[in-house]
Amino acid sequence: KQEVTQIPAALSVPEGENLVLNCSFTDSAIYNLQWFRQDPGKGLTSLLLIQSSQREQTSGRLNASLDKSSGRSTLYIAASQPGDSATYLCAVDGGSNYKLTFGKGTLLTVNP
Amino acid sequence: DGGITQSPKYLFRKEGQNVTLSCEQNLNHDAMYWYRQDPGQGLRLIYYSQIVNDFQKGDIAEGYSVSREKKESFPLTVTSAQKNPTAFYLCASTFTGELFFGEGSRLTVL
């Protein structure tokens, strides 16, 4: 059974720092990996989707990498801003009907 | 604008009552999903549907039921058989594998 772990569970940084969020998964046979952002009491917003054949994806200040063989993905946030404060979740798709397995998330706080 | 609409946003229920959460999407997506989110836990899949008039159980389907009579709609009923229904419920849909979510419905059992 696929398990997804996100480390750290919480992270607090000063504004302007570059930071890395980590996601690991136990079964490397994945179809894709997706990073989401969740604000308190809200739904999830898709940030980046990496197909299993890709190594990374970029969107603005966000860069996500994928290393299937080691079961790892990282989300890099450049020049962090207070508006980046949220919970970030990663989820892997094992290729069966687009069912995702989620990590518990990393709560990011960016201090002005 | 295209998106997923969940209603109600907040719902209170007495023990022993069934409640139905609405999920409507105008993205023309074939697949729809219901997830449950509890504090300190990852999202867990309740039910999913790939096409109209067909749906499958997820990891925690006991105490829940769904229907998929229209492509746009995937309502979730939380029955009295669900032992711990207080949670945040999220509906999602996809066409290509990238999941899009609604804003969620928070159910509280009194």
Image: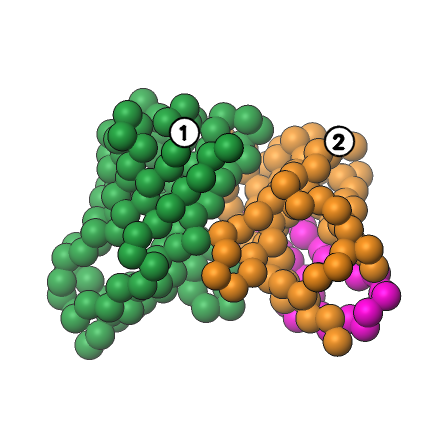
Q: Quadrant of the C terminus of chain B?
A: bottom right
At x 56%, y 60%, the residue is B38
Asked whether A83 falls inside the magenta stretch, the response is: no
Give coordinates of residue A43: x percent, y percent.
Answer: 51, 58
**What chain is tagged by disc 2?**
B
Horizontal arrangement in the rendering, residue A99 relative to residue B60 (left or right): left
Q: Colour of chain A?
A: green
- What span is in magenta? B1-24
Relative vertical location of residue A21 with respect to residue A50 in this rendering, above or below: below
- Locate residue B69 relative to residue A75 in the image: left or right: right
Q: Nearer the viewer, residue A84 or B62?
A: B62
Task: Identify the residue under disc 2.
Answer: B54
The tint chain B carries is orange
Comparing marks 2 and 1, which lies closer to the viewer? Answer: 1
Residue in view at x 82 percent, y 69 percent: B15
Say whether residue B88 is left or right of residue B22: left
Work out whether disc 2 and disc 1 sit on a shared chain: no
Give me the residue at 62% from left, 35% from top: B31
Compared to A59, does A106 lie above or below?
below
Q: CA distance from mark 2 to mark 1?
A: 28 Å
The quarter holding residue B51 reads: top right
